[in-house]
Amino acid sequence: MLTYELKKSPGVPLYEALYRCIRSDILSGALKPGEKLPSKRALAQNLEVSKITVEGAYGQLLAEGYIRAQEKVGYFVENIPQSPQRPVEKIETSSQPEDPAGQNLGGPERFPFSVWSRLQREVMLDYGEKLLLPMPNQGIRELRCAIASHLAGFRGMHVDPENILVGAGTDFLYNLLIQLLGRNRTYAVEDPGYGKIRRIYAAGGVRCVSAPMDPSGVRPECLEGADVLHISPSHHFPTGLVTPVQRRQELLRWAEAGERYIIEDDYDSEFRFDAHPMPTMQSLDHRGRVIYMNTFSKTLAPSIRISYMVLPPELMASYRERLGFYTCTVSSFEQYTLARFLSRGHFEKHINRMRKFYKQRRNRVVAALNGCAFAEKLRIREEDAGLHFLLKVDTDLSDEALTTLFAGAGIPLRALSSYYQGEVPPEDRHQLVVNYAALREETLEQALKKIEKTP
C-alpha cells in the first residue's frame, strides 16, 4: 500500500500533492511499469483523505500518461522511459571584479522614491485601463516629447520626437541596430573600451574590429574596412578622455565618405562637474550619419530599464518599414511615469543633487589617496567627468599582481590594460580604474592601511 505524508501547503491542493508523490515514485522507478495501484477507496482510507482527493490525483496522472485505466480491474503504472540522472555541475563564478561601468551607483538611498511613487499613483489614477492598451512601437509620444525637450535643454540637440525610439536597455537597442543596419557590415569599437559592447555585437553575428585610439579619441585613419563606428566621445570609458571637436569633425567626414554610420553612446555624459557637457556629435551631423543613444539606467537606477536612441530620419523610415512589427519593450506605466518625471523638472533636480553628491565623494576619495602613506607613488588622472578616474601606480608589480593586491585589501579594481584588445602601450600599464561612485571612503582608508603593511 502506498504511504505518503501529505501536508497542506498554501496554494497546493491535496490532490496535487498526492499526484506529485505518485509521479515522483513512477519517475524514480519505485513504482514499476505494469504495477497495479491501490483502489481509490483503499488509498483514501490508508491516507485518511477523501476519495475525491485520490480521484483528482489519479485523473491527473491518467491525463498525463503516467498510468492507464483498465475497466473493472484498476489503474496500472505505464512504462515511462527513465532518464539518467545528470550530476549537478558546479558553476564557476568569475574571480574578475565587476566592471565599474556596470556597477550599481549611489545605492537605493539616492533614488527619489517619494517623487517617483507619487507620479506612479497619478499615472494610475489618470490613465487607468488605458495602461493595458497596446502602445506605439517607438514608445508613447508623451515620453518621446519629454526626452526631446530634455535633449534640447541639456545637450543642445534639436530632435523630432518621431525619430526617437524607446527600448528596455541599450542591449536591446544594439540588437535592433544590428538588424536595421545589416549583419554584412563591420563594426569598429574603441580599443581600449567597454568589453560588453564587443560581446553584444559578436553575439549578434556581425564582424567586430578594434578602433585604436590616441589622446584625441578614435583615429580615423585606422577605420579602413569599417562601416559602423561605436564611440563614446563625451566621456570615454575607461580612459575618461573627451574627443575634441576637430577629431569629431574628422570622424564625421569619415562617415560621410561612404554608406557609414556612427553610433554615439552618450552614457555617463550627465556627470560632468566643472564644465558644461560637450556638444554631441549628433548636433554636428548634417548628413544623417549619427545614431545617438542614451539610457536612464545610470542616472536613476539600473533596474529602470529605459533607454532610447535618436535615428536619422531616413533610418527611422527604414525601421518603420522593416522592423515596425516589434512591440515596445517598456511598459506604458513606466513610460508615463518617466515622462512626468522629466517634464516637471524632477530629473534635472535629481541630476543636480547627484552631481553634488558624487563630487563630494570624489573629493573625499582623492583626499584619502593623497593622504595615504604611499601617496608619492600614486597619480590621479581624471577629466572632471563621469564616475570613475584612473589611478597610476609607481610599482614594479604586474597589473595582475596589482589588482590582486587591492582585491585582497577589499577593493576590487580592474587595470586599464584589461580593457585592451591589442597591445597595451607602456604608459597605460600600472593604471587602475577607480569607480568612486561605488566606493566607500572608510572602506578605502582601511584598504590603504592594509596595503601599506603588505610586504
Image (cartoon, rainbow, N blue to C red):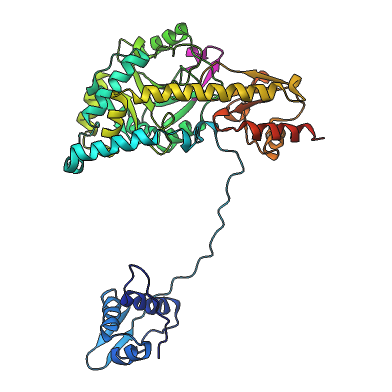
Q: Is residue 215 magenta?
A: yes
Instruction: Determine which quarter of the picture holds residue 302.
Output: top left
Pick the front one: 15 or 91? 15
**In the figure, is residue 255 to the left or right of 220?**
left
Q: Quadrant of the N terminus?
A: bottom left
Which residue: 39% across, 14% down? 280
Q: Residue at x 43, y 8 (%)?
A: 250
Residue that protrudes farthest toward the top in the picture: 246
The magenta stretch is: 210-223
Where residue 20 sits, quadrant-wise, is: bottom left
Q: Position of residue 268 (x, y in %)?
A: 46, 24
- Return the residue found at the far right: 455
Residue 370 visible, this orientation: yes
Percent from the top left, x then y, of residue 189? 47, 25
Image side of residue 18 versus residue 410, left or right: left
- Give the image location of residue 214, x and y in percent: 56, 14
Residue 200 placement (x, y as % from top left)? 43, 35
Foreground: 255 or 147?
A: 147
**Does residue 221 appear to the left or right of 148 in the view shown?**
right
Q: Is residue 218 visible?
A: no
Residue under the image location 38 percent in, 32 percent down: 170
How many badges with numbers are in the image?
Answer: 0
